[in-house]
Amino acid sequence: MKKLLYSSSIFSIILLLISCNVDDSQHLEQRNWSLSWSDEFNGEKGTLPDDSKWNIDIGNGTDGWGNQEYQYYTDHPENLSMDGEGNLIITARNEHFGGQPFTSGRINTKGHFSQTYGRFEARIKTPYGPGIWPSFWLLGADLDDKLWPQCGEIDIMELRGQIPNVVNGSVHGPNYSSGSAISKSFGLENGRFDTDYHIYAIEWGIDYLEFYVDDTLYQKLTPQDLPGNWVFDHDFFIILNVAVGGNYVGFPTSKTPFPQQMVVDYVRVYN
């Protein structure tokens, strides 16, 4: 349920140059938001995420969660736990488990919380390194009935660890999924996303999706921008994970340091 890997060095250089250019026309609208759901991750050190809010995915899914990924997701505190300082830590580790060469963590709010429209945001410090793939994303809550990509997918933030100063925001739906997803990159000219926290968000209405990094709007989509049906008119639930390897990022290399951690300060949703 993600994009295909474009692994050539030429593409990476072009992507980096393009992604560092931010659209100057922000056209930011003043909106009044009301908090509808949040997790501040204030649990005790070493504890798992609140099970009244989150499900923990276990295993390697079907065919590496559909992306040929190499990690095995666990509920081990070494992969997924509070740090006692108001953060969730998702850790990818170089260790064999469950028939896979790496372990990591993945959680979702399916059946606990979903919402149509609003602002979805998270404050995150990303991991880095070749083959590391952190994500903050949404899936249509009708996934079991309509399957993917008809249910819709919104990738609020994902990052190729080998390009630590560029994040991507994307949507998937009928006729625009995997390698044909509608996507745009946002790059830091003088920094990396793994060295500090940044706020990744979407603002979502009846006929628009806006993608933000901190206070910068870098992509706006409307039904007219898509080559298929607009499927962003129903409830979506939240997913946080760190994948290792797969179609989108390739295999880790000797230059990939382990363990790698995604630090999540909070997730907040507004009406």
Image: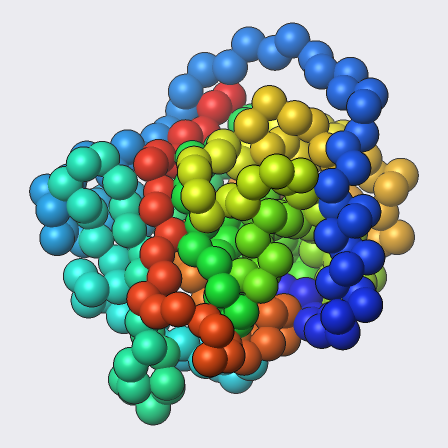
Number of numbered labels in the structure image: 0
Picture quadrant where residue 269 is located: top left
Instruction: Tell me what residue is drawn at x 29 percent, y 86 percent.
Output: 96
Location of residue 268 in the rendering, given as x and y in whole percent from the top left corner: 41, 30
Depth check: give the residue in front, 34 or 44. Answer: 44
Location of residue 217 in the rendering, given as x and y in whole percent from the top left corner: 69, 27
Location of residue 155 in the rendering, given as x and y in whole percent from the top left corner: 60, 49
Q: Is residue 8 left or right of residue 115?
A: right
Q: Quadrant of the N terminus?
A: bottom right
Which residue ends up furthest to the bottom in the rendered image?
99
Q: Image height check: is 183 above or below 232?
A: below
Instruction: Tell me what residue is drawn at x 35 percent, y 42 percent.
Output: 264
Q: Is residue 6 left or right of residue 121?
A: right
Location of residue 21 in the rendering, given as x and y in whole percent from the top left corner: 78, 37
Picture quadrant where residue 187 is located: top right
Depth check: give the residue in front, 224 or 246. Answer: 246
Q: Is residue 158 left or right of residue 175?
A: left
Q: Image height check: is 245 above or below 139?
A: below
Q: Image height check: is 167 above or below 251?
A: above
Depth check: give the residue in front, 245 or 193. Answer: 193
Instruction: Tell me what residue is drawn at x 61 percent, y 38 percent.
Output: 190
